[in-house]
């Protein structure tokens, strides 16, 4: 088999067993208290930021292989994006992705929270350009031959 240029290759998962794979990721959007209040009370010019961000996260998870070059396309069983606006200076985003597949769904969960955070940023940038997105990270992973992971 010819070598791949610069060592890039999509990993062959054909021999791996199909199993339930679950990944949970999180991210945080830091913003001014007034920005958080307006997100919470649905007072943004563009509309409901929470619903829009949840939808963006779900859509991003479904299209991960189109955005992250070496990811396998996966039929996802479910994508749940939760957005918590209870803090005065931050929005916490969590995504849980499930698939019955030969490879994990960590990237799908990470991309879901990232897209949701970017959507919140986009919807609020006219009132708060100082927002920061941080703590994008894998929280939990279940299934597969490498075992479970909990942060």
Image (cartoon, grey):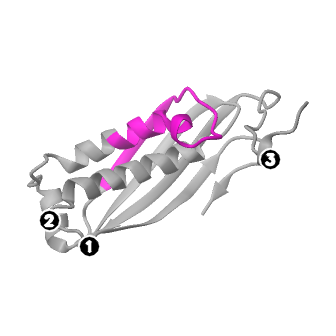
Q: Which residue is mark 2?
A: 127
Image point (16%, 46%), residue name: 48
Where is residue 68 shown, x and y percent of the image?
Answer: 56, 43
Say whether disc 3 or disc 1 marks the residue closer to the N-terminus.
Answer: 3
Residue 44 sits inside the magenta stretch = no
Residue 59 drawn above or below residue 39:
above
Say whether disc 2 or disc 3 marks the residue closer to the N-terminus.
Answer: 3
Q: Which residue is mark 3?
A: 7
Frontmost of labels 3 and 1 is 3
Residue 82 sits inside the magenta stretch = yes
Where is residue 86 shown, x and y percent of the image?
Answer: 25, 64
Where is residue 130 shown, x and y percent of the image?
Answer: 26, 73
> Could you give the CA–CA distance between mark 3 and mark 1, rounded to whole angstroms?
39 Å
Image point (35%, 61%), residue name: 92
Q: Which residue is mark 1?
A: 130
Frontmost of labels 2 and 3 is 3
* Quadrant assignment for the C terminus: bottom right
Please give left or right for residue 96 compared with residue 29 in the image. Answer: right
Task: Tell me the element at label 3.
Answer: helix
Q: Which residues are magenta?
A: 56-83
Say which mark, if any, is on residue 28.
none
Choose between 103 and 8: the one closer to the eye. Answer: 8
* Quadrant assignment for the N terminus: top right
Q: Based on the displayed image, in which of its 4 quarters is residue 20 positioned?
A: top right
Task: Tell me the element at label 2.
Answer: loop
Please give left or right for residue 11 compared with residue 63 in the image. Answer: right
Q: Based on the displayed image, in which of its 4 quarters is residue 80 positioned?
A: top left
> Could you give the CA–CA distance between mark 2 and mark 3, rounded to whole angstroms?
45 Å
Binning the other alpha carbons within 10 Å of mark 1 as few (below 14), some (14 to 19) or many (20 upward) gives: few
Marks 2 and 3 in Cβ contact (< 8 Å):
no
């Amino acid at each position: 088999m010819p070598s791949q240029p610069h060592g890039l290759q999509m990993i062959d998962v054909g021999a791996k067993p199909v199993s339930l794979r679950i990944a949970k990721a999180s991210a945080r959007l830091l913003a001014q208290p007034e920005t958080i209040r307006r997100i919470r009370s649905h007072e943004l010019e563009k509309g409901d930021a929470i619903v829009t961000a949840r939808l963006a996260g779900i859509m991003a998870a479904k299209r991960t292989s189109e955005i992250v070059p070496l990811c396998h396309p996966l039929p996802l069983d479910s994508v749940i994006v939760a957005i918590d606006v209870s803090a005065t200076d931050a929005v916490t985003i969590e995504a849980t992705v499930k698939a019955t597949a030969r490879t994990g769904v960590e990237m799908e969960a990470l991309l879901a929270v990232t897209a949701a955070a970017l959507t919140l940023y986009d919807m609020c940038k006219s009132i708060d350009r100082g927002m920061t997105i941080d703590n994008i990270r894998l929280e939990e992973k279940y299934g597969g031959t490498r075992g479970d992971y909990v942060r």
